[in-house]
Amino acid sequence: MLIHPANYAIEELRGCIAPVTTLTGPGRGIHSRSATERLQATVLAAFERKEEVYLTIRSSKK
């Protein structure tokens, strides 16, 4: 699994995860690069503190 910037999941991803700051529609979001950078900084800081990091993915569909 890879995590990288992408604002249009349907067109740009094939099984990867792309963080975004705001969802704008099905498979779409904005500011993916800044969201990815924030996630990376948070995770790397946790690794430096020898903490475990877990990623939980939940569907917002009801």
Image (tube, grey):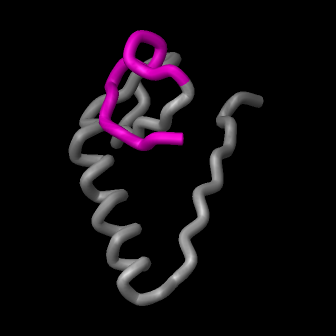
The extreme right residue here reads 62
For the residue pair 23 and 9, the one nearer the viewer reads as 9
Q: Residue at x 29, y 66 (%)?
A: 41
Image coords of residue 38 (percent x, y): 28, 58
Q: Residue at x 64, y 46 (%)?
A: 57
Left or right of residue 51: residue 6? left
The extreme bottom residue here reads 49
Query: Does 5 appear in magenta?
Result: yes
Image coords of residue 59 (percent x, y): 68, 36
User: Which quarter of the rendered picture does the N terminus lie within?
Assistant: top right
- Determine the main secondary structure of the stretch shown in magenta: loop
For the residue pair 55 and 26, the one nearer the viewer reads as 55
Image coords of residue 32 (percent x, y): 29, 37
Left or right of residue 3: residue 31? left
Q: Is residue 17 above or below residue 38?
A: above
Quadrant in the rendering for residue 6: top left
Quadrant in the rendering for residue 52: bottom right
The extreme front residue here reads 1
Left or right of residue 47: residue 15? right
For the residue pair 42 and 61, the one nearer the viewer reads as 42
- Give the number of marks: 0
Q: Is residue 4 above or below residue 44?
A: above
User: Which quarter of the rendered picture does the C terminus lie within?
Assistant: top right
Q: Residue at x 41, y 10 (%)?
A: 11
Quadrant in the rendering for residue 22: top left
Q: Which residues are magenta?
A: 1-14
Query: Does 36 appear in magenta?
Result: no
